Image (cartoon, helix red, strand yellow):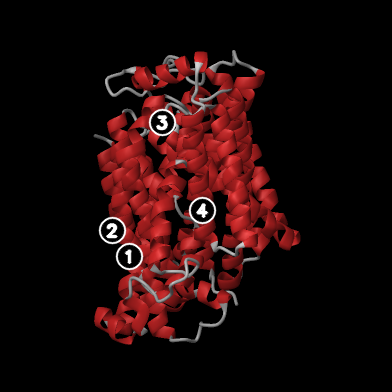
Amino acid sequence: MEHLHLGDWMMIAIYGVLMVVIGLYCSRYAKIGVNYFAGGRRIPWWLSGISSWMGAFSAYVFVGLASKMYQVGIAALFHLLYAMSFAWLVGAVVWAARWRMTGIITVPEYMEKRFNLATRQVFAWIVTPFRIADDGVKCYATALIMAFVFGIPAWQSIVGLSLITIAYTMVGGLWAVMITDMVQFVILIVVIMVVVPVGLAKIGWLGGLIEESPAHFFDFFHSGTAFNDEFTVWYFITMWLMHPFLYNGSFTLVQRYTTVPTPRDARKSALMSMSLGLLFFPLLLLPPMISRVLYGDALMGSTTLMETSYIKLCVDLLPVGMIGVVAVAIMAATMSALSADYNIYGAVLTNDFYHRLINRNASQRRLAVVGRFSTLLVGSLALLVAMLVESFGGAFDVMMTILGLIAGPTTIPILLGLWVRKPPAAAAIAAVLSGVAFGALAKWAWGFNYAAFVLGNMSVTAAVFLAWGMVSPVAGTAREKVDRLFDVELHKSGASWRIDSGESAGPAPEGSDKVPSPFAISGVILGVLGIALGTVGLFAGSGRSLAIDGIVSLVLIITGGLMIMRGRR
């Protein structure tokens, strides 16, 4: 059933155009490689933290996770989303500063510094296809929910989402990714701040939520003793142990650490993301709980209906215009994740393939040009995957499971290698292969669930990696290289991180100190969206609907104005 009116379509169209405008605005600051992929190492820590938080989830929060909240209540929050916040806390304490000290642009580049060229290429070509396929699945999943709830044909959502994201990411580079994340963050928070009170008012505020919710809705842990059961103590421990590795070894999150000015800023970025999670994750997941009270068990028994619990509440309670903003928020959540991947995996193709293997003497301007083509290629391949997902059927599920087996083990040598000197390059490869083999057995022979088999294969990977280092430690010239990495680049008193050192950066090129104003351009974008929403409300709404559109419009305009004033300082 179609729920979008002309005013909603106007909001979606205006939003898409404005995202491309951000890309065009940022293009002047992305003319050299270090600016295109690293923002000239001048990304503010708070902007990096916002971007990291936005990139950590996609429309999955509105769909899959909403379904979990609808079924089990706050256990999903503490077991899943707060595990992300814990991951950022661990990152701030253990890894963020060291990542900034490496002076790298991509994780595979660090793998050559720590191990060798072969390891660099193996990790680049293991991880990149997995992430491209995963991006295609994210886009497809978002398109399905847009089709089911809003009546937008899936292929139109796929093409629209992909082309807009490719356009602003390809043109504007990392600065465009960061600034669009900032705008999308504000939109998401505004939607939450509207949906939550409107929904609570419908059910009798917090008292009604507590009284009418199922008895288990406020239980931190659910019954079950098997290691495989979800939302038990074992499940909690599993998720909280594996998330710090999965997140802090992620190419996109590492980029948030390496593109800020100093190691201290990297820590502050991680703490910013953690704080946003602690503050906004509960608000983000209140709507599915409100839906459970409002609709009772009407959606239970159907996975599709439970996955629409979040958006159904918005559609039923919000007026024309605001429903379009909700659609924009869903798009924004996915676009943040996609744009981050498009940029960093474009960087992998540019730095770890083209620059390292084809043209070692490429200029920074040449790298920026190649980077744009690489970003276009990554985005286009993800678009192709999204269009073909349905035709792949069961074979695609198997492929994604196999690639999922690889995701966990690849982070172990990456992260432990930042602290442990002894394991050689062979240990990194052998450890990943061992972890994948164990994961395959755990998944298909022993029937472990996702959390259990990922924790298992990561644990085996770590054991093999560390044991190999003890039995056959790195030696000779390879040991000298590792010692230099630890004693000079990663030493807290060293200063190598202060400049863009290494093969992919070189001394800071002329013009790399020019940076855009995140506040000014974001303020303009939010102001335009606010004016558009207010106009839609005047023509399409009355009474309560007009009041909601008017209030949100005013909030966007005032927020935009304050940002513009801040940007002029």
For the point 45% across and 30% down, the residue is 38
Which tag, 3 or 1, sits closer to the chain's start? 1
Mark nearer the N terminus (2 vs 4): 2
Residue 433 vs residue 506: left or right? right
CA distance for labels 3 and 4: 21 Å
Residue 358 location (% of width, % of height): 66, 19
Residue drawn 36% across the image and 80% down it: 216
Give the secondary structure at mark 1. helix
Q: Are marks 1 and 2 in contact (CB under 8 Å)?
A: yes
* Residue picked out by circle 3: 420
- Residues at marks 3 and 1 touching, judged by CB atoms closer than 8 Å: no
Farthest front residue in view: 471
Whether the residues at callouts 3 and 4 have beta carbons within 8 Å, the answer is no
Q: CA distance from mark 3 to mark 1?
A: 37 Å
Q: Which residue is mark 4?
A: 456
Q: Are marks 2 and 4 in contact (CB under 8 Å)?
A: no
Q: Is residue 516 above or below residue 405?
A: above
Q: Write down the residue under mark 2.
A: 279
